[in-house]
Amino acid sequence: VLFPLYIYPKNCQVSRDICAWKPLYDSLDAYPTLQFTVIINPNSGPGGNRTFPDASYIAAISALNAYANVQTIGYVASHWAARPVAEYQADVNTYAHWASHTGGNIAMHGIFVDEASTNTADIAYY
């Protein structure tokens, strides 16, 4: 299952029982042999100039990464190959840096590139 999770994880740092992502956790529990790829999108990318996401995202992503049947991947917008490459690469590097967080497992297992160009001339961009 490819699941674009573009919902803020409200209350996830408080309790899993009141977390906005609880319906997903319930599905993961109900179908442990089904593989889920979950796209994490804090803010059309990793969330601006922060090194790590906020406490709600840290709690929620850590909970997802505890499942054996989940792979989390970070969202990056390419604006149809019009976004400056340095910005695009900075988002990828920020997600890669999340693996170094010591307060929870928020590592991403890949990148989802959205708004991809269909022009073959843009292949080098990607």
Image (cartoon, helix red, strand yellow):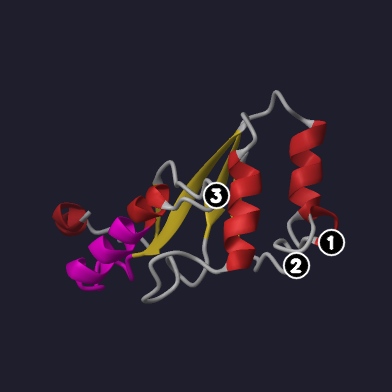
Provide the residue designation for mark 2.
11
Residues under numbered marks 1 and 2 in contact, where contact means CB atoms less than 8 Å apart = yes
Q: CA separation, marks 1 and 3?
A: 19 Å
Residue 80 on the magenta span: yes
Residue 22 vertical placement versus 7 (above, below): above
Q: CA separation, marks 1 and 2?
A: 6 Å
Q: Nearer the viewer, mark 2 or mark 3?
A: 3
Q: Residue furthest front?
A: 102
First to last magenta residue range: 78-94
Quick check: 31 left or right of 120? right
Quick check: 56 left or right of 71? right
For badge 1, the amino acid type reads Ile
Under circle 3, the secondary element is: loop
Quick check: 89 left or right of 78? left
Image quarter (top left, top right, bottom left or bottom right) of the C terminus:
bottom left
Foreground of the two, 25 or 55: 55
Which of the marked residues, 1 or 2, is nearer the chain's N terminus? Answer: 2
Provide the residue designation for mark 3.
104
Provide the residue designation for mark 1.
18
Res. 32 image quadrant: top right
